[in-house]
Image (tube, rainbow, N blue to C red):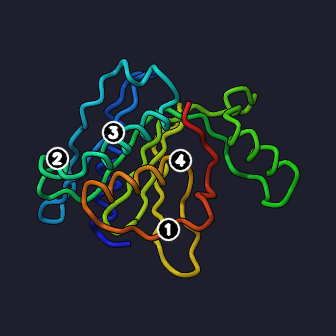
Amino acid sequence: MGIVHERVLDVMCASLASRTRWDEPPEVYLFGLSMGRPHLHRMDVPDEVWGLTRPPLVLEQVAAEAEHRTGMLAAVAPPDLHAAGFCCETWSMRDETVPGTPEHARLDAAARAHRLHRHPDRIESRTMWVVDRAGITYMATWPRGESAPHRYTDFPGAGRDRARGAVPETLDRLVQALLGVSLPPRPGGAFRQARRRAR
């Protein structure tokens, strides 16, 4: 992993650390990259919009609007635009189960059905995802009560698992709409360190 990748994760973790209260609204970000240093631009999504439905569905609407208005949005995007990001509070479970076991299948089904908030061992976390113009996916998650965030980077390429799910796949759409690039598909795989769902 290169220094720019580490700097992206550093900016993500600093942003998570700046969120001092819980139950804050989600945020969508554009990441600029100037002289090898990333910086955030918060997109203006009204707070009340986030209360209309689950945050990933609102993010999908933002991406759909970007796809519909590609030329206009690209004209106002920062000239050094490099990536798009999304931050929200999530429920997660430590992924200590073995793939293929009944317990792993139960947790996976609960996550897909958005039932992790009912699990007695759930963990509340702040989570940020970022996808850059090369299709690299970054994730930083800070479980409540822990002293530091967990950092992950997923590089596209043959033989590698790709992070997948509604958020990274929607960020792919947003990056493609804003930057006019084609990103590699996400055929399978997932972040295996923690299972999480946006609340």
**Labels 4 and 3: the sequence-earlier one:** 3
Q: Tell how many labels.
A: 4
CB atoms at circles 4 and 2 under 8 Å apart?
Answer: no
Front position among marks 2 and 1? 2
Residue positioned 25% across, 54% down in the render: 178
CB atoms at circles 2 and 1 under 8 Å apart?
Answer: no
Q: Amino acid at mark 4?
A: Ala
State the quadrant of the N terminus.
bottom left
Instruction: Please name the residue that numbered disc 4 is placed on.
Output: 166
Instruction: Please tell me whether mark 1 sits on a helix, a strand or a loop.
Output: loop
Circle 2 residues within 10 Å: few <14, some 14–19, many ≥20: few
CB atoms at circles 1 and 4 under 8 Å apart?
Answer: no
Q: Is residue 118 above or below residue 142?
A: above
**Labels 2 and 1: the sequence-earlier one:** 2
Q: Amino acid at mark 2?
A: Met
Task: Place residue 128 in its image quadrant.
Answer: top left
CA separation in Å, label 4 and label 2: 25 Å
Q: Amino acid at mark 3?
A: Val
Q: Amino acid at mark 1?
A: Pro
Residue toward you, 51 or 27: 51
Circle 3 residues within 10 Å: few <14, some 14–19, many ≥20: many
CA separation in Å, label 4 and label 3: 14 Å
Residue toward you, 49 or 125: 49
Instruction: Please name the residue that numbered disc 1 is placed on.
Output: 185
**Labels 4 and 2: the sequence-earlier one:** 2
Residue toward you, 23 or 131: 131
Looking at the image, residue 124 sits to the left or right of residue 42; the answer is right
Instruction: Please name the residue that numbered disc 3 is placed on.
Output: 28
Looking at the image, residue 46 sits to the left or right of residue 120; the answer is left
Q: Which mark is residue 173?
A: none
Circle 4 residues within 10 Å: few <14, some 14–19, many ≥20: some
Q: Which mark is residue 72?
A: 2
